[in-house]
Image: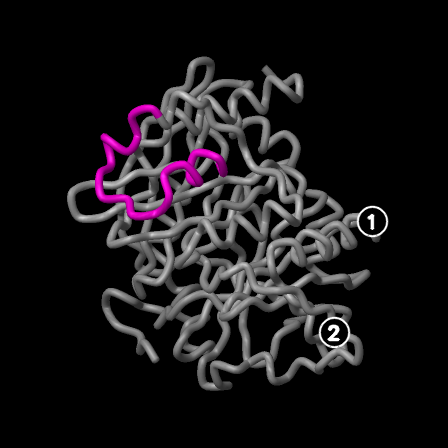
Amino acid sequence: MNQASETNPLGLNGIAFVEYASPTAEGREDLNRLFGSLGFSKLQRHPSLDIQDYVQHDVHFLVNREETGHAHDFSAKHGPCVSALGWWVADAELALARAVERGARAYEGAIAYHGAKAIYGIGGSLIYLVDERVGRRWDDEFLSLENPERHPSRGFYRVDHLTNNVRKGTMQEWADFYKRVFGFTEVRYFDIRGQKTGLTSYALRSPCGQFCIPINEGDESKSQIEEYLREYDGPGVQHIALLSDDLLSSLNELDAAGVPTLDIDADYYESVFERVPGVTEDHQRIAELKVLVDGDEDGYLLQIFTRNVIGPIFFEMIQRRNHLSFGEGNFSALFRSIERDQERRGVL
């Protein structure tokens, strides 16, 4: 357990859950199918609220189906969404008090999760401060489903990072929020250019070192960031990166499940293995699956991105081999792929 300290003022110690919501029954069923395809099994439900728990290793995706409350109101405004995040803290009462002292705004509505407090996060979503003293198996309060929906694991065992999209001119404001309230530290600053659009990104690492939050802002009306902000009606979580120890095996299962991923130009693979030597996975299979590769002399990563699958939200799947970057060497190829997807949808 990470106790609160000068560098970790709230005693943050990783991600407990990600909460999703949708304003329609059809949208909630889409979430059910998507999470099953990603290898999450629907195993549990909240004892008194209409909230279902989808589990894969230590990753918990909660679908809040309540007809009242924050998640309901948030999805009514934003459509299919990430309505809340749950972060482990050493002491929820102390963490809330310190968060408010540091400028966070406490959520005063009903708290859905035992032993948790909540503050407002990106775009009016919630960040639940989940007390580790209730036990790392906080989900014991959930009830086992009589008819669970089990799916084979795809090998995703942790959330690696959660990227935020914000309005132009507010990136520093949100970076300061995470640094001031929680003790996040700067990792990198990026200025990314595509053929037609661009964005800037400010990557932060949590004080517990278990996850990162990159923050993006666009610079043109047709950029992918501005498209997100229009569809989502405000800032929020753009994508969630799931960590695998064997990405190619994970993708073999995803391919069969029909999860749509971005296309990458074939000529990308003509030089990538010269740029990133030492990749031990099958090079031909990497190219066939459209996996991106980046790294340096110390290690490398493999990464791939889905298309938008929850409103404007998508997923990244990533494997790391002694390498902690965000795939900077792939930004040009990735940006071209995203722009091509925007062209396909008539945005560009």
Residue 64 covered by magenta stretch: no
- Residue 166's place in the image compared with 116, above or below, is above
The spot of residue 107 in percent (x, y) is: 58, 63
The spot of residue 26 in percent (x, y) is: 82, 49
Is label 2 in contact with label 1 (beta carbons under 8 Å)? no
Q: Residue at x 59, y 42 (%)?
A: 313
- Residue 120's place in the image compared with 88, above or below, is above
- The residue under label 1 is which amino acid type? Glu
Count of picture labels: 2
Near mark 2 (Cα within 10 A), the count class, few <14, some 14-19 or many ≥20, is: few
Q: Which residue is mark 2?
A: 148
Viewer-closest of 72 and 262: 262
- The residue under label 2 is which amino acid type? Pro
Q: Is residue 61 left or right of residue 14?
A: right
Region of the chain picked out in magenta, as a range = 270-289
Viewer-closest of 13 and 161: 161
Q: Is residue 168 left or right of residue 324?
A: right
Residue 274 covered by magenta stretch: yes
Judging from the image, what secondary structure is the residue with disc 2 in? strand
Mark linked to residue 5: none
Q: Which residue is mark 1?
A: 26
